[in-house]
Amino acid sequence: MRSPHPEQWRQRNQQKKAAGRRLLTLTASNRHTLTAHWLDPQDGSVHAESLSHAGTFPSLTPVLPEVAWDEREIHDLFGDVPEDHPDLRPLVRTPRWPQAFHPLARSQTSPPNWHDVEPDNPAKLVAGEGITVMKVGPTHAGVIESGHFVFSLIGENVLHLDLHLFQNHRGIEALLEQRPVAAVAPLVTRICAADTVSHQTNWALAIEAMAGYQSAEELRWRRVILLEAERVLSHLNDLAQIPAGVGFQVAQQRALAMKETWQRGLKALFGHRLLFDTVGPGWAQKPSIDGIFILIDNLRQAFKPWRALVQSHHGFMDRMHAVGVVRQASAERLGAEGVAARAAGTSFDARTTMPLYQGLSIVPVVQRGGDVQARFLVRLDELEASLRIIEESATRLRRSPTADPPWVLPHDLTGHVVTYTESPHGLNVHDVEIQAGRTARYHVRPATYRNWPLLAHAVAGNAVADFPLINKSFELCYSCTDR
Amino acid sequence: MSHTRKSLQIRHVDAGSCNGCEQELTALTSRAYDLQRYGLDLVASPRHADALLVTGPVTDTMAAALSKVWDAVPNPKILIALGDCARGCGVFQAAYASHGGVKGAQLQIPGCPPEPGPILAALKTLLTSEASPRAIRPRGTTTRA
């Protein structure tokens, strides 16, 4: 593709957004190129815009605020400068990183000589009389992932939340570079335990697309079952955590018990309680179909009375109402994904355009409230829909011929593919470039990447004591965001 | 010298985990495992803890925070490495911002992630452990004033 003039870069991407397309990735390479991949939600087609530059490029953030973090990350990891970016503070790097250390500018896997200083980056604070600053983390009082939050408060209300994530940054994208294709899957599986099947499927689909591999019908149904089993697991977890956030212990404990039942079922059916290492290029774990139906029956028996309990509890439902509100216009401006977007009225679910789900009836679950309650209700309905999709897929799997041709990965594979799946947390995208059987570039745009800034937006104006509840209603991943 | 404890309070710190170890550790608080009935519990402050349980390969950004939490746990104290990343044998050991797990843990719980049953069984061994708790510093961290 011919590179546009830098001024056209903004204009063309702005036009894509205005036309209703959704940004899959903004990927940088160490050859001073940028590529934006846009998904057409109507027909599932993917359109690319590319830019070659000489180390600086016009920032898209002033016209597309959803890429503010993408461009900060590119600045940190490649050293390329987005000109006119409104907030170019470090996002991933810390004061401990040597000045010239840009790990993706040249495949860097060995650690640099870290500066012996604290890792804290400058925080954006609100100044003025009566304003207090509250810092939380990076370690937390509960068993959760690490992240640092800086609140500016007036009285009990949040004026601004400044997010300092990437505490768990390991350097996974650099570690994935120059890796033989056969050695990629164990890493991709472990990018994030909550969205692991989605990550594994993206990798498998990328390699299969490059190799021109036509997967058998049977394989397709196995993957749909695994993706939906992961959604059920993740939604059960989040549905347990939201009542925990307001001290509704009965609801939490009963939901955790359902989650445990489901995980034991997954272990029996697929060999792993969190579904690690269950999908790869040319294959997916084969479950016992009878076992699937038994597990679903067991879950439904517990879920139906549990749902009645929580929805008939007026105190609980009221507690979630009008808290942490996201308006649809904000959600779309900031590129919200998944449950957070659908709970704010956006009718987008990537399963409607994924070839894997063709022939299945996928209706996006939409709520209008944009609050904690809306996000809770979306998950309730999505969980029940996932059980129906699993049943239908299992029925079709039973009817499919057991033609699962053994497939040997080509050694000399070369190609560049962008793949996506609707993970439990939203649209999860992988941009994979392979050269002669080794990864040249592997960019992961996880589902929660755009929802973090949205969370900060949703918290502003709320009582700070509601932060845990609002946070749990988003239930965002740190691990795949930080990578 | 052998000693028996009646309880063990544990503080958890994620130092670069994929959230798998966290999910399985959280399962211990559910009624299927109910770790509190054994005198084990996960506590909110290192000041209340007898043991520090670490997950993840110890990222560079988390190393200082981890060291501060360890220093805040009163002596004598126990270091626990939960999962292969913290044990120094996970898949992300070689990443540039990984410090390669914690060194010198008195209790190592293998797995990716370890399942709740084995985690609980391993933690229970600390209640009747032959070894006395001792002070150990997580690897890759330095003493800070």
Image (cartoon, coloured by chain):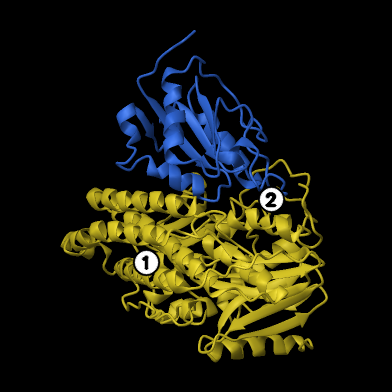
Task: In this rendered view, identify the residue nearer to me: B64 or A389.
Answer: A389
Q: Answer yes or no: is residue A466 visible.
A: no
Q: Is residue A290 above or below residue A39?
A: above
Q: Quadrant of residue A366?
A: bottom left
> In this image, A129 relative to A105: left or right?
left
What chain does mark 2 sit on?
A
Residue A173: assigned label: none
The CA distance from mark 2 to mark 1 is: 31 Å
Q: Dot 2: few (<14), some (14–19), or many (≥20) neighbours within 10 Å? A: some
Q: Give the residue drawn at x 47%, y 38%.
A: B12
Task: In this rendered view, identify the residue nearer to me: A82 or A364.
Answer: A364
Q: Which residue is mark 2?
A: A95
Task: In this rendered view, identify the residue nearer to me: B120 or B45.
Answer: B120
Q: Quadrant of the C terminus of chain A?
A: bottom right
Image location (x, y in percent) of residue A358: 48, 81
| Visual hue assigned to chain A | yellow
Q: Which residue is mark 1?
A: A461
What chain does mark 1 sit on?
A
Q: Answer yes or no: is residue A148 visible.
A: yes
Q: Give the residue drawn at x 45%, y 50%.
A: A267
Q: Disc 1 marks which amino acid? A: Gly
Q: Dot 1: few (<14), some (14–19), or many (≥20) neighbours within 10 Å? A: some
User: Mark 2 vs mark 1: which is more N-terminal?
Assistant: 2
| Visual hue assigned to chain B | blue
Q: Give the residue drawn at x 65%, y 51%.
A: A170
Q: Quadrant of residue A29?
A: bottom right
> In this image, A410 relative to B53: left or right?
right
Q: Is residue A220 above or below residue B75?
A: below
